[in-house]
Image (cartoon, rainbow, N blue to C red):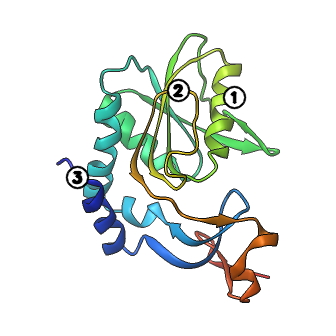
Amino acid sequence: MNLTENEMLDIFNKTQALLNGHFLLTSGRHSNKYFQCSKVLQYPEYNEAICKNISDFFKNYKIDTVICPAIGGIVVGQEVARQLNKKFIFAERENDIMTLRRGFYIKEGENVLICEDVVTTGGSVFEVIELAKQKKANIVGVGFIVDRSFGKVKFGYPQHSVIKMEVISYLKEECPLCKEELELVKPGSRKILK
């Protein structure tokens, strides 16, 4: 099933995965909108359909391994790898540095596709790109579900997003939502922050 961007946004709304409020993003910035991809990806049929958009885009690329940053990208990367019939691994932070653990490895010259769920500033993806470069891998591209930057973030490799939406984010010091004293939520953990 090939879904249009509007059909995918309908799925996000139907699964209550597009949230409105005052959110702390992974980047440290604040926003009034948050894509909680895990609420969509918990449904295998949606996960398969949405990730098909990424795997179809990269299906003619020479790929050995799909890699993603933990934790948000894991479900995306695994499903894209399954559809492409490629090895899947993920990187995670150890002492604030993105690294490979759990016996995962990248060989020199290995062709890797990087996947992620949501890109705002691209910080986690840039960290995985740096990790792949350190391992002397060939980065063939970056695929992700939501591009919150509406194409402004450029990774320097072929990239493809399923949904592009410009969502405004603010530095904490400039956040109008903070000035309104709206509760700040870090999605996933659902903690209210002071």
Please, what secondary structure does the residue beneath circle 3 have?
Answer: loop
Give the amino acid type for the residue marked by disc 1 in the picture.
Glu
Q: Is residue 28 left or right of residue 75?
A: right
Question: Residue 157: which numbered mark, if any?
Answer: 2
- Classify 143 as above or below 113: below
Q: CA distance from mark 3 to mark 2?
A: 24 Å
Dot 1 corresponds to which residue?
130
Give the amino acid type for the residue marked by disc 3 in the picture.
Leu
N-terminal-most mark, 1 or 3 = 3
Dot 3 corresponds to which residue?
3
Please, what secondary structure does the residue beneath circle 1 have?
Answer: helix
Q: Is residue 71 left or right of residue 37?
A: right
Q: Which part of the image, by quadrant, shows the C terminus?
A: bottom right
- Residue at 20% x, 47% y: name it: 2
Q: Observer-nearest residue: 184 or 83?
A: 184
- Classify 192 as above or below 69: below
Query: Can you give x and y, in whole percent of width and height, for residue 42 in the image?
Result: 38, 62
- Residue sitting at the far left: 1
Q: CA distance from mark 1 to mark 3?
A: 32 Å
